[in-house]
Amino acid sequence: RTVYLNGDYLPEEDAKISIFDRSFLMADGVYEVTSVLGGKLIDFAGHSKRLERSLSELEMQKPDAFDDLLEIHRELVRLNDIDEGMIYLQVSRGSAGDRDFTYPSADVKPTLVLFTQSKPNLADNPVAKIGIKVISIEDQRWGRRDIKTVQLLYPSMGKMMAKAAGCDDAWMVEDGAVTEGTSNNAYIVKGNTIITRHLGTEILHGITRAAVLRFALEAQMKVEERPFTIQEAQDADEAFITSASTFVMPVVEIDGAAIGTGNPGPVAARLREIYLEESR
Ligand code: PDD
C-alpha cells in the first residue's frame, strides 16, 4: 500500500514518524474518514470543512498541504486502485522533539498522514440486510465530542464491551439520553418521523448525518433533532446509525430488546438506498 506522509507518497513500511509526535504522546491529533465508492470520494467537501473546524477549535496549524487535500485523496485512490473503501486522514500537532504539555512553537509543523483501506463490500454490505445489535453504555468521553480527535480509547472499550455481550456496537448515554454510537450517529424512527440528537458539543456533527437528514426531508419524512432515551428507542418502530463507514445501518436490537419487528425497517432501508444513489 502507498501512503502519504508530510508531502511524500511512500510504501507504508517506509512511512515513519517521531516517537515525540504529540498524537502519540498526548492524543493531540484530529482525523477524518472519507469513503470511496466506485473510485469516487463521498462528501469530500464536508469532511474537509469539518477538519478545518477541528483544527481551528484546537488552535492547531493547518498543514501546508491543506489546499491540496482533494488532490492527495484522489492520488491515493489512484495509486492504491481503490474501488470501494475509505481514506483515513490524520493531522497531529507534530513533534517538538521532547515531551511537554504545552503546545510547541509555531515553527513546529503539524504531521499529516493519509492512508487508504480497501473495503470491497462497503455499499453491498450484507449486514445492512440483517441489521446490528447494540448495547447501551455510559458516555465517559471528554466534553468536546464535536471535535474529531484521535482520543478513541473509550469508543474502543465500548466496542469491546459490545463484543463481549455478543453485540456489534454500543450507544452511549449521558444524563439519561443517548448521545451517539461509538463511531456513528444514532437515530430512532416513529411513524414518519426520524429522531436524532441535536447538534452540540456532546456529539460529532456527522457528515453522513447532515446528508441523510437532508434526504429525509426531501423524501417528505419529518425530522426531530432532540435527545431520546434508551426506553424510547426500545419502543420505537425502527432504529439506525449513520457514518462514513456504514452509511445508513439498521439497528434491530438494543440491550436485548427487539426494535419493531426485530428486522431492518423500511425507513432505514429507504434512506440507505437514497444515500447510496445520491452519493454514487
Ligand atoms: N467515525 N460519531 C462519532 C463518535 C464518530 O466517530 C463518527 C465517525 C460519526 C459519524 O460521522 P461521519 O458521518 O462524518 O462519518 C459520529 C468514523 C467513521 C471513524 O471513526 O471511523
Image (cartoon, rainbow, N blue to C red):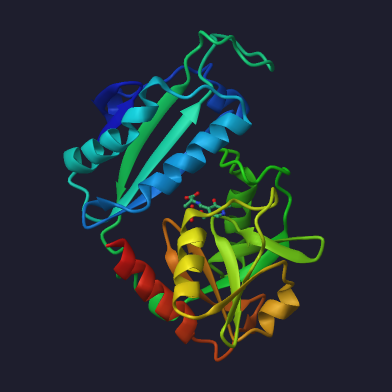
- For the point 21% across and 57% down, the residue is 38
Please state, as top left, top right, bottom left or bottom right, where the C terminus lies in the image: bottom left
Does residue 46 appear to the left or right of 252 in the view shown? Answer: left
Query: What x and y, as percent, mark residue 28?
Result: 59, 28
Query: What x and y, as percent, mark residue 52?
Result: 50, 35
Does residue 106 appear to the left or right of 45 in the view shown? Answer: right
- For the point 56% across and 85% down, the residue is 192
Pick out the residue farthest to the bottom: 261
- Camera-nearest residue between 124 and 65: 65
Query: What x and y, as percent, mark residue 254?
Result: 63, 76
Please state, as top left, top right, bottom left or bottom right, where the N terminus lies in the image: top left
Asked whether residue 99 appears in the rendered view, the answer is yes
Asked whether residue 123 appears in the rendered view, the answer is no
- For the point 50% across and 59% down, the residue is 210
Quarter holding residue 72: top left
Pick out the residue farthest to the right: 175
Query: What x and y, as percent, mark residue 231?
Result: 74, 78
Residue 81 sits above or below residue 182 on the image: above
- Camera-nearest residue between 144 and 126: 144
Residue 17 sits above or below residue 80 on the image: above
Residue 63 sits above or below residue 32 on the image: above
Residue 195 sits above or below residue 86 on the image: below
- For the point 56% across and 36% down, the residue is 54
Quarter holding residue 211: bottom left
* Count of numbered circles on the image: 0
